[in-house]
Amino acid sequence: MKIIIAIDGYSSTGKSTTAKAVAKALGYVYIDTGAMYRAVTYLALEKGYASTSGIEVKPLMKALRQSEIKFVYNPEVGFAELYLNGKNIENDIRSIDVANWVSEIAKQPEIRTYLVNLQRKMGEQKGVVMDGRDIGTVVFPDAELKIFMTASEQVRAERRYNELQSKGDNTSFAEVLANIQHRDHIDTTRKESPLKKADDAIVIDNTHLTIDQQVEKILSLVNK
């Protein structure tokens, strides 16, 4: 019997990397909901709907409804990559510019409602590993297995900084740490679907865990 695995947690806790590995081991579909919010953020920045004066939600929602967001499996990397209107934006959405805006975009009720409905459709057939901020609390409150991932602020910033450096992004460590602190604050205090642990979620603190150890833990929980 296939199930839904919901993985929530703070930014840069390795949710996506772990979820991809779990999905691959089980032969499940992996859906990165955080990437979907990043895609909307990318669209907002591209269209000029995100600026210091705020988010222009109405024109952004119009552009979003006219856009296609989908995941396309890439056998060369072993997971599905995100496409917006036919363009692979997997690398574009990982920039610090997108990271600086994504929490502001994600707290907009209209955008969350639109994407949550899209995510639910993607998971209708089960056999899905989905990660994000509100999967176990809002998107799939009845998911058979819920994981909540956390790690120390410093370690998360180091991981994110190293990832950006490996891609040639010279953003400073201080900027990365500040971005994580800012996102944590917005994610946990927003009115619409704030980041919080579901009552029946299992906490995994991966401050001192490798990806393989995290995957093993989750797979053992699936088997139970």
Image (cartoon, helix red, strand yellow):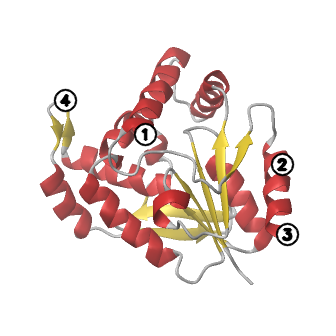
The amino acid marked with disc number 3 is Asn
Q: Determine the image quadrant of residue 45.
A: top left
The reply, left or right, for residue 127 in relation to residue 10 is: right
Q: Nearer the viewer, mark 1 or mark 4?
A: 1
The amino acid marked with disc number 2 is Asp
Q: Residue furthest front?
A: 199
The reply, left or right, for residue 206 in relation to residue 149 is: right
Whether pointer 1 and pointer 3 mark residues with C-beta atoms closer than 8 Å, the reply is no
Q: What percent of the width, then of the height, locates residue 147?
A: 67, 54
Up/down of 63 relative to 158, above or below:
below
Which label's residue is closer to the chain start, 3 or 4?
Answer: 4
Q: Determine the image quadrant of residue 218.
A: bottom right
Between the residue at mark 1 and the residue at mark 3, the CA separation in whole angstroms equals 31 Å
Res 212 label: 2
Q: Nearer the viewer, mark 3 or mark 2?
A: 3
Q: Nearer the viewer, mark 3 or mark 4?
A: 3
Residue drawn at x 47%, y 32% is: 184
Res 187 label: 1
Tag 4 residue: 52
Which label's residue is closer to the chain start, 2 or 1?
Answer: 1
Instruction: Say if residue 171 shows up in the picture.
Output: no
Which label's residue is closer to the chain start, 1 or 4?
Answer: 4
Secondary structure under the numbered disc 2 in the rendered image:
helix
Residue drawn at x 57%, y 53% is: 198
Tag 3 residue: 223
Label 1 neighbourhood size at 10 Å, few (<14), some (14-19), many (20+)? Answer: many
The amino acid marked with disc number 4 is Thr
Residue drawn at x 43%, y 57% is: 36
